[in-house]
Amino acid sequence: MNATEVVLAIDQGTTGTRAIIFDANGSLISSAYLEHKQYFPQSGWVEHDPAEIWKNTVAVIKSALKKGDIDPSKVVSVGITNQRETTVVWDRSTGKALAPAIVWQDLRTAEMCEQLKKDKDIEKQINEKTGLPISTYFSATKLHWILKDYHEIAAKAREGMVCFGTIDSWLIANLTGNEVHTTDVTNASRTMLMNLETLCWDEDLLQIFEIPESILPEIKPSLSHYGDVNVKELGIEAPIYGVLGDQQAALVGQQCFEPGQVKVTYGTGAFILLNIGEKILHSKNGLLTTVAYQIEGQKPIYAFEGSIAIAGAAVQWLRDQLNIISSASEIERLASEVPDNGGVYFVPAFSGLFAPYWDTSARGLIIGLTRFSDKRHLARATLESIAFQVHDVLNVMEKDSSVNISELRVDGGASKNNLLLQIQADILQIPCLRPKIEETTSLGAALFAGIGAKVWNDFKDVSKIWQLDKKVEPRMEDEKRMKLITNWERAIERAKHWIKRD
């Protein structure tokens, strides 16, 4: 690749779409971003407009090219990363969406999930085949709902005229002029329909969810040729080579290519992925087993995943509900004004606790308050709550994988908070590493796209692209650390089982 040639990464997220252009050194040349509308037609329902997402994708690509003063013909490869589990169906002949996209956050199939869980044989079968628990989170029940609720779509499906896909499939179809219907293994592994061992759609699971295989996309390795861009108004004639779900893309962007390497993305919540290598492991502590990535011609790499519901959202709560801070960045200064939490602990279980507790009846709790306590202690307790939750997930990851984790690679908005990183390193007693390139999700898609187009040869060739911005070493005494963890665990126990259901 010469100096004028570039790689385009499309990052389609829950709230918006970003296009980022990287050069051969992995440097970010230009980017553009657009939000899309969130629809809440009923309580617990969350939808997106697939047509709006595609329209915004075209717009941000054109904008990024213009900002960087880049000739579209200089784009040599395209990578895609996307919000996972969100479910789209479209007409095979016209390429038009047939219904709103049902977002991963949507809860409309909660009753169906509860019914399925009553059959312990089915629950065990789904978990063993997919590495996932039965949950509204994943695509299978959403697609089942669409086929049951939209009779016209069900009729079209029986005629073989319907395509289902997660957002990556929707973008690939549109980018290739409706010529390609495919997905990658990481996104397929989040549908609750793919067998982790065979990497194929599982007949037993399709039967459980009453889904015809004819509407499902072809499953391909994350790094493989998906087709060529065929959209006249973009002017790009490049192959699509890299496709990954967003958290897996961040794992690749952080270059966690060896078993035992782990990353956390601090966002509204926090997502922690641990590379566990080529062998499928099943967690005994509520972790998900998922495909981390696969390179064409090679065995897949698997990962444990632990999700934390409330991380950055706790900081937003201090800002928006309590008005303790006026901006998220202000929390670091406020929390730094005190040497410790003053005995205050904050469990931000606003909608229950995710991994490793999985208690939907838990609720938020602030405990240890005295007349000495003030907003600075609450600010520090908020940052500590994020670090404690990550510690809890990594603790069970080590148990389930028999791996000793030696460092944590961090990204996401809150990774800019140096005090949070110090607290995190102290609680974990391992270094926290923040890279110079913040957009690790987009970088992960770009790296695979670039390797596919021979911009880079292999993982060794791209290792120089990951550069350290800051390494935070632990410095807390172990006695103090253990006291903090013990008190956090006491607070967790008091937050659990708060909601009593009849």
Image: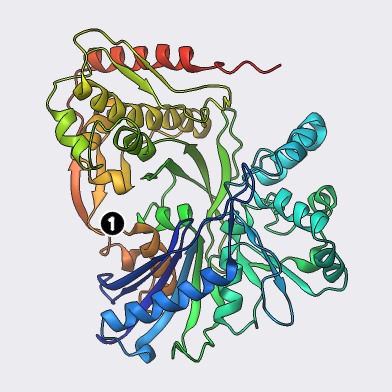
Element class at badge 1: loop
Say how the picture is coloured.
rainbow
Q: Tell me where residue 265 appears, x and y as whole percent.
A: 38, 46
Q: Quadrant of residue 200?
A: bottom right
Residue at 69% x, 64% y is 99
Q: Position of residue 137 (x, y in %)?
A: 62, 45
In the depicted view, which residue is nearer to us: 12 or 228?
12
Q: Residue 4, located in which quarter of the rendered image?
A: bottom left
Q: Residue furthest top?
A: 370
Camera-side residue: 160 or 453? 160
Is 135 above or below relative to 83? above
Q: Residue at x 80, y 58 (%)?
A: 147
Query: How busy is the neighbourhood of tag 1: few (under 14 within 10 Å), some, or many (20 plus)?
Result: some
483 up-or-down from 199: above or below = above
| Quadrant (top left, top right, bottom left, bottom right) of the N terminus | bottom left
For label 1, the residue is: 438
Q: Is residue 181 left or right of residue 1?
A: right
Please name whichever residue, 220 or 260, is drawn nearer the observer in this view of the structure: 220
* Residue 312 pos. (x, y %): 35, 40
Q: Is residue 450 visible?
A: no
The residue closer to the viewer here, 384 or 424, is 384
| Quarter of the image with the C terminus in it | top right
Picture residue at 61% right of the left edge, 42% below the top: 44
Q: How far from the left and from the top, in percent, is residue 268?
A: 40, 43
The amino acid marked with disc number 1 is Glu
Above or below residue 125? Residue 438 is below
Quadrant in which residue 443 is drawn? bottom left
